[in-house]
Amino acid sequence: MGLLISTNPARNFEVLGQVPVSPLTEIQEKISLARNAFHSWKELGIDKRIVLLKPIFQEFQNNKEMLAKNMALEIGKPIVECRKGVETGLKYFNDFLDNGAAYLQDETKKIEGTIHHISFEPFGVAAVISPWNFPFGSFIWGVIPNLIAGNTVVFKHSEECPLYGEILEKLMKKGNLPKGVFSEIYGDATQGAQLLQGDITLIWFTGSTRAGQAIYQIAAGKFVKVLMELGGSNPAIVFEDADIGKAVPKLVASRFTNAGQFCDAAKRLIVHESRFDELVEKLAVSIQEIRLGDPLDEKTTMGSLVAKRQVKLLESQVKDAIQKGAKIVTGGKKPGNLKGAYFEPTILVNIKPTMRVWKEEVFGPVLPIVSFKTETEAIRLANDTEYGLGAEIYTANPETAKRVAGQIDAGFIEINQANHWHASNPFGGFKKSGMGRELGKYGFQELCQIKLISE
């Protein structure tokens, strides 16, 4: 039996522990148990399912600090961010409990003298695979709505945080859900593929586009529904009339939170030529205030990347940009005084469309900045990507904002200081950023078969 070795990326990869990889027989057994539990879980009804999930919410609530600390240890995120992440995850969990029944309430309408009933029925066994960058929040998003909707769940967390997966499984077990309703397996892409090849009827996945494309092929062969939230290379457009003073703090947070390791970060900054130098200068000053260091230090505002491979990838992307003429404004390398998967917050200018930092998703604290002259050029640059998760627009003109937002190929747009994050809002992207939506009414209904009965 293989082992997943967990290390601390912020402390020179010291070993934290190990977790046995789930053998194929165990994966198949857990799928079988989920299949056997499905009918009774479905027939229980949404209100009773919600009642059974409330003790689990309380278990998580009672263990917030432990959940935050172990997140910091295993993925290198600052403890302050980890606490916020746990609180946010609990907020979403609570919203799902409060509103899940309303999201899936039956609908009835009368048409030409006949009555038409629309109901939302669960698919069956959901295979849920979540990423390491938000190990608590992604788990909540993937598992809890599925359980509320009536699907049973076999869950796999990322191999980058297997100990965190164990913690989540132990807390879930304390809720005493019926046998087979929730179970967890451990492993990497191999075990993930074994899970997906099993007798499952729905796939929920958050991760890279490359992995998503492989999963889509499996789903096609099995002819099962798949919901995927994948990579992103979000543009942020700053027009000449933007309030730069307000834009800078949001841009810094949007790019450098979690060391830039999240799908909907602002990964490409597109600035009107008349404000370019001013914005670059102010961003560089603001970035100097970022404190890079040990995630468990309360004063740290940016921790490490999750693994050596992430640093190597980032180094190769930055090197490619420099070789093709990019200029480093600040950062650009690993810090010399820290041992682990660290990389300095970085700003790059003189960007060309052939550079990897422009073409690829950059999953780390590197921000390429380009200028534009016209609105048409800004829109073209924003859409110059295979991704389409989100975008940001900064302008004092509401008409400009509305007009540009309507032409950007993305699942959500933030204008100025607006924040799209809310449990009731749909979340998902265009193009290679995924398919389907999570959260809110639309996200819950994605987890169900829609049945119509006419009488």
Image (cartoon, helix red, strand yellow):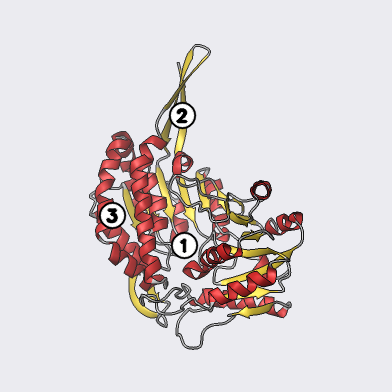
**Residue wearing tag 1:** 190
Outermost residue toward the bottom?
336
Q: CA distance from mark 2 to mark 3?
A: 31 Å
* Point 59% across, 76% down: residue: 284
Secondary structure under badge 3? helix
Amino acid of disc 3: Met
Along the horizontal axis of the image, is 128 left or right of 19? right
**Quarter occupied by the N terminus:** bottom left
- Looking at the image, tell me whether mark 1 or mark 2 is earlier in sequence order: 1
Q: Quadrant of residue 315?
A: bottom right
Q: Position of residue 250 (x, y in %)?
A: 53, 63
Label of residue 97 in the image? none
Q: Residues within 10 Å of mark 1 (few under 14, many from 20)?
A: few
Q: CA distance from mark 1 to mark 3?
A: 24 Å
- Residue 172 badge: 3
Q: Amino acid at mark 2?
A: Lys
**Where is mark 2, residue-wise?**
451
